[in-house]
Amino acid sequence: MKTFLLEIITPDKIVFSDNVEMVSVPSEAGVLGILPGHVPLFTKLVSGELKITKDGKENFISLGEGFMEVGKEKVSILVTKALHADEIDEAKLLAAKKEAEEALKNPPSKEQQISSAAMLKSILGDLKVVRRRHRPSSIPS
């Protein structure tokens, strides 16, 4: 099966670098699926769940905002955060989710409302990934 090089990079480290069969990413236009031979593309990414397919198995990573460049044989993803399920503390996320939801009920300012909404969206993406932890994965972290 054809593959392409996928690199996921945050300001701190290279989170993932390997040949994959497919990647699905959350963009402003919706979820984009990238396969080998995809047309060149540069797009903004939003927080959410990234799905990698390698050797017929799926792995999920929670992404922050960033950008993706699709080239002829390589896809580069540059994001503010990228967390594998085993890097996420579900109990802390649930507490942060509750705080964000409370802050949205009676925000002291428009800026606080926007900040709380963005935080809640990020938390929900992390929770979605961590709850997939039960699924087996052969892709290394």
Image (cartoon, rainbow, N blue to C red):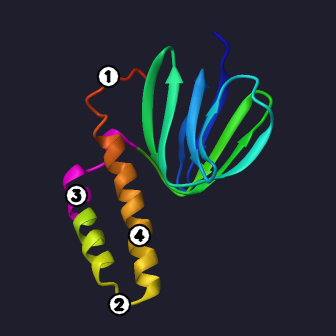
Classify mark 3: helix, strand or loop: helix
Amino acid type, residue under disc 3 in the picture: Leu
**Front disc: 3 or 1:** 3
Whichever of labels 3 and 4 marks the residue nearer the N terminus, that label is: 3
Residue, disc 3: 94
Asked which secondary structure carries label 1, the reply is loop
Pointer 4: residues within 10 angstroms few (<14), some, or many (20+)? some
Which residue is drawn at the image coordinates 80% and 32% (left, top)?
39
Query: Is the Cβ of the residue at disc 1 closer than 8 Å to that at disc 4?
Result: no
Magenta residues? 84-95
First-in-chain label (2 vs 1)? 2
Mark earlier in primary sequence (3, 1): 3
Q: Are marks 3 and 2 in contact (CB under 8 Å)?
A: no
Instruction: Look at discs 2 and 1 and give the one toward the viewer.
Output: 2
Residue assigned mark 2: 108
- Give the quadrant of the N terminus: top right
Mark linked to residue 136: 1
Name the spot of residue 17 as percent of width and height, x first.
58, 33
Name the outermost residue toward the bottom: 108
Residue type marked 4: Ala
Mark 4, residue position:
117
The prevailing secondary structure element of the residues shown in magenta is: helix
Q: Quadrant of residue 77?
A: top right
Q: Earlier in the sequence, mark 4 or mark 2?
A: 2
As shown in the figure, which amino acid type bears the numbered disc 1? Pro
User: Of helix, strand and loop, which one carries label 2?
Assistant: loop
Callout 3: few (<14), some (14-19), or many (20+) C-alpha neighbours within 10 Å?
some
Whole-number angstrom distance, CA of label 2 to CA of label 1: 43 Å
Instruction: Work out how far the residue at label 3 is from the one at label 2, CA to CA, in angstroms.
Output: 22 Å
Amino acid carrying label 2: it is Pro
